[in-house]
Image (cartoon, rainbow, N blue to C red):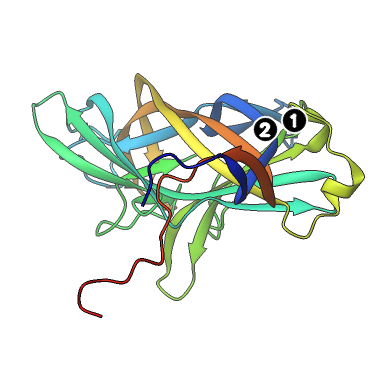
């Protein structure tokens, strides 16, 4: 077969990217700010998720005052973020792209007495007054988990585009908190290029998600006496936790693209020696 092949028209089947949105350092773990009114009103803005991590060796009791302080938290580090499946994405009526991330967090807790523990979120969380000595390692605010029933409350960011929400998913069969579900809804007008009607109507139009630059932020604060039940308390350490990440959403369609070139390999009709 000759190596001097003439260029020809090549028909390439490819996934063509038409536009993309780059959301840099989106805060994926947060809680919603509330007003100081009575009752408090959700404000639709973000704050770090406040964790009330139980001090090492602290026990829930009914003493007043409770002097079983335990050892407070010295540091909290993200070990890994576990994605429960690939990011989900949907084009909503040719107007918006919705991205959903389901994940768990594995954290290493260091206490001031030089002991360590592994904290898996949201599995190890409880609402205030819902303490379980076998499973609870940390609490969250009553605006995140309802303290009466322990049911999750959706956290919103709906002041600035793109709108976001975070919720703790509850596995009723296992009576446990399964994972976090973060959702961001991106208007197509926010993408790098305006898609034409024929592109929006293309049946192969899809959204492809790239995640990068996962960045945690941790701020260890003061000790806090938490309500373990209606009659008992337990000492904890307040820790503000946030998780940031770049989310790149690419909109693409499947197309046949013609180029002029030479294939790297072309078969010929020369019979093999065995024939």
Asked if the residue under mark 1 is in contact with the one under mark 2, i.e. CB atoms within 8 Å, the reply is yes
Tell me the SS state at disc 2.
strand
> Hey, which quadrant is residue 213 in on the image?
top left
Residue pushed farthest left?
A: 114
Residue 94 visible from this viewpoint: no
| Figure quadrant of residue 46 | top right
**Residue where numbered disc 2 is placed:** 20
Q: Residues within 10 Å of mark 2 (few under 14, many from 20)?
A: some
User: Where residue 60 sits in the image (x, y, percent)?
Assistant: 27, 47
Q: Residue at x 45, y 57 (%)?
A: 85
Residue 148: x %, y % from top left: 55, 56
The relative height of residue 94 versus residue 77 in the rendered view (above or below) is: below
Question: Of marks 2 and 1, which one's residue comes earlier in the chain?
Answer: 2
Q: CA distance from mark 2 to mark 1?
A: 5 Å
- Residue at 40% across / 25% down in the picture? 215
Q: Position of residue 201 (x, y in %)?
A: 86, 54
Of residues 138 and 32, the one nearer the viewer is 32
Residue nearest the viewer, comparing 98 with 236? 98
Q: Position of residue 78 (x, y in %)?
A: 30, 33
At horizontal 41% and vertical 67% (from top left) the residue drawn is: 269
* Res. 191 mark: 1
């Amino acid at each position: 077969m000759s190596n001097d092949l003439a260029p020809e028209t090549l028909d390439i089947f490819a996934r063509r990217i038409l536009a993309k949105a780059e959301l840099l350092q989106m805060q994926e773990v947060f809680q919603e700010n509330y007003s100081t009114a009575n009752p408090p009103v959700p404000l639709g803005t973000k704050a770090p998720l406040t964790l009330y991590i139980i001090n090492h060796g602290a026990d829930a009791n009914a003493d007043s005052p409770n002097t079983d302080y335990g050892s407070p938290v010295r540091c909290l580090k993200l070990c890994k973020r576990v994605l429960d499946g690939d990011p989900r994405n949907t084009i909503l009526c040719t107007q918006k792209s919705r991205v959903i991330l389901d994940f768990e967090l594995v954290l290493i807790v260091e206490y001031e007495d030089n002991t360590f523990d592994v904290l898996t979120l949201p599995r190890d969380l409880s609402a205030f007054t819902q303490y379980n000595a076998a499973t609870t390692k940390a609490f969250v605010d009553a605006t995140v988990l309802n303290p009466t029933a322990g049911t999750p409350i959706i956290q919103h960011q709906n002041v600035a585009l793109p709108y976001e929400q975070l919720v703790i998913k509850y596995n009723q069969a296992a009576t446990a908190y399964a994972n976090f579900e973060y959702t961001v809804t991106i208007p197509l007008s926010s993408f790098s290029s305006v898609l034409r009607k024929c592109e929006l109507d293309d049946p192969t139009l899809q959204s492809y998600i790239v995640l990068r630059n996962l960045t945690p932020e941790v701020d260890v604060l003061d000790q806090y006496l938490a309500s373990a039940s209606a009659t008992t308390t337990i000492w904890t350490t307040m820790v503000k936790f946030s998780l940031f990440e770049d989310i790149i959403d690419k909109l693409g369609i499947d197309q046949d693209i013609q180029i002029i070139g030479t294939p790297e390999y072309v078969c010929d009709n020369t019979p093999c020696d065995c024939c």
